[in-house]
């Protein structure tokens, strides 16, 4: 139960790490969106494992198939069923996890709740599930492209463990040039050595990812129970290993005065309001302002590590566990495309909600 998200653009994911396949059922897709497998594959390739030594060495092509909802290259408005086959399962890697609970992982809570679980690769708690979200996000991106030309959804890492980017060196083009999706070339070089050391030691580290939506119209979001920030935060928090989410200034807003935090408003030359800053992260009262929507989330260090950790067995005996198998030393890297996909789904969902209630464009005129 509870495997779906979204109000109108509604995504249900299904499947486990070591089952035959996983995927997403995407309902509420607007009709007439140009869509084929290659368009979705483009985004899946960014998340796919085994692309470099800094991600899990599981080698999955993550080839997506569209089983329904598309006719002659366009969506029909009926549910789009997406399927990705699992091809590189190695269940023997996970024998230990079947009997013992990994500290920091979902093994113990799944067992306590359901009394049965698929331990192979973490089953449903494996980040294999995020492939389905990225595929659904690919559809959301194509629909957004049709409905809001020029809108962009981009993610990048801002922190890996003790290392943070230097925002004075921020370069959008650099994001695609390094394996960490980091907008700072110097940081990318430092992080490479840092993560290599941790990887060789069988350890892991956490990260912070920022996702920016540029070009979203003003007016998306509903004031109380479907605030745009509420839904964005829920979407990001639903990603495996996420432990914190911020919008705009986030936790740091608590350190500011009212003067420092208020984004002053001016009238722009094109008759649209202009803000002097963006502490709000592009959302006021749960509704988008038309500025960049800025969302940030923290992922914890991968819990499957080679350092022995104390735990218990299913029968309650004290034990030690060393997690072998193939794991991401920093899940933040592959979480970047996942965060982007979740943001794309939420923005499309809110665009459709807005059009359902208000129609096209903001209603209130200024000037
Ligand atoms: C992209 C991505 C890759 C991940 N890779 C691994 C991994 O290789 N090994 C692991 O133990 N956890 C990995 N995780 C984290 C687990 O899936 C997650 O910690 C687990 O489901 C428990 O949920 P929680 O951390 O949200 O409490 C990954 C998470 C993401 C987002």
Image (cartoon, helix red, strand yellow):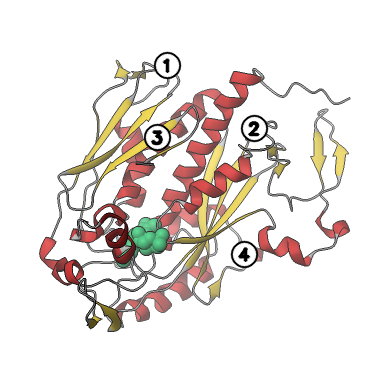
Determine the residue positioned at 23% across, 63% down: 57
Between disc 4 and disc 2, the foreground one is 2
| 281 or 109: nearer the viewer | 109
Q: Secondary structure at mark 3?
A: strand
Mark 3 vs mark 1: which is more N-terminal? 3
Q: Residue at x 52, y 47 (%)?
A: 234
Residue 169 marker: 4
Q: Earlier in the sequence, mark 2 or mark 1?
A: 1
Using the numbered discs, state the Cα–Cα distance from disc 2 to disc 1 in whole angstroms: 22 Å
Q: Residues within 10 Å of mark 4 (few under 14, many from 20)?
A: few
Q: Earlier in the sequence, mark 4 or mark 3?
A: 3
> In the drawing, does residue 42 fall left or right of residue 210?
left
Residue carrying label 3: 11
> Relative to 346, does residue 188 appear above or below in the rendering?
below
Q: Nearer the viewer, residue 193 or 17?
A: 17
For the residue pair 154 and 347, the one nearer the viewer reads as 347
Q: Residues under labels 2 and 3: Cα distance?
A: 19 Å
Q: Horizontal and vertical percent for residue 351?
A: 58, 28
Residue that protrudes farthest toward the left in the picture? 92
Q: Which mark is residue 318?
A: none
Question: Which residue does the numbered mark 1 point to in the structure image?
Answer: 32
Q: Which of pointers 4 and 1 lies earlier in the amino acid sequence?
A: 1
* SS class, disc 4: helix
Instruction: Tell which tag, 2 or 1, sits nearer the viewer.
Output: 2
In the image, 265 versus 305, the foreground residue is: 305
Image side of residue 149 versus residue 68, left or right: right
């Amino acid at each position: 139960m509870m495997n779906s998200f979204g109000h109108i653009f509604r995504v249900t994911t299904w499947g486990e790490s070591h089952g035959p396949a996983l995927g997403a059922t995407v309902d509420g897709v607007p009709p007439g969106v140009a869509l084929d497998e290659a368009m979705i594959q483009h985004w899946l390739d960014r998340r796919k494992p085994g692309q470099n030594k800094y991600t899990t060495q599981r080698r999955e092509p993550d080839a997506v198939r569209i089983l329904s909802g598309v006719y002659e290259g366009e969506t029909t408005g009926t549910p789009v069923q997406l399927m990705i086959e699992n091809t590189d399962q190695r269940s023997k890697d996970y024998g230990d996890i079947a009997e013992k609970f990994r500290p920091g992982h979902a093994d113990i809570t799944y067992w306590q709740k359901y009394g049965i679980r698929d331990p192979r690769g973490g089953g449903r708690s494996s980040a294999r599930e995020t492939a389905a979200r990225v595929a659904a996000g690919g559809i959301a991106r194509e629909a957004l492209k049709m409905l809001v030309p020029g809108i962009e959804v981009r993610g990048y890492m801002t922190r890996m463990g003790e290392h943070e980017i230097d925002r004075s060196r921020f370069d959008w083009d650099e994001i695609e040039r390094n394996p960490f999706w980091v907008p700072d070339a110097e940081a990318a070089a430092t992080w490479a050595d840092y993560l290599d050391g941790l990887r060789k030691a069988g350890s892991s580290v956490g990260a912070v990812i920022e996702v920016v939506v540029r070009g979203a119209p003003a007016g998306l979001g509903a004031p109380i129970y479907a605030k745009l920030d509420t839904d964005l935060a829920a979407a990001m928090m639903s990603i495996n290993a996420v432990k914190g989410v911020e919008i705009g200034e986030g936790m740091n807003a608590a350190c500011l005065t009212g003067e420092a935090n208020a984004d002053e408003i001016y009238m722009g030359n094109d008759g649209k309001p202009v803000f002097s800053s963006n502490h709000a992260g592009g959302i006021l009262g749960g509704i988008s302002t038309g500025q960049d929507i800025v969302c940030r989330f923290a992922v914890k260090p991968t819990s499957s590590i080679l350092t022995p950790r104390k735990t218990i067995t299913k029968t309650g005996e004290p034990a030690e566990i060393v997690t072998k198998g193939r794991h991401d030393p920093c899940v933040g890297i592959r979480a970047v495309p996942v965060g982007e996909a979740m943001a794309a789904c939420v923005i499309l969902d809110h665009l459709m909600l807005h059009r359902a209630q208000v129609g096209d464009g903001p209603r209130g005129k200024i000037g």
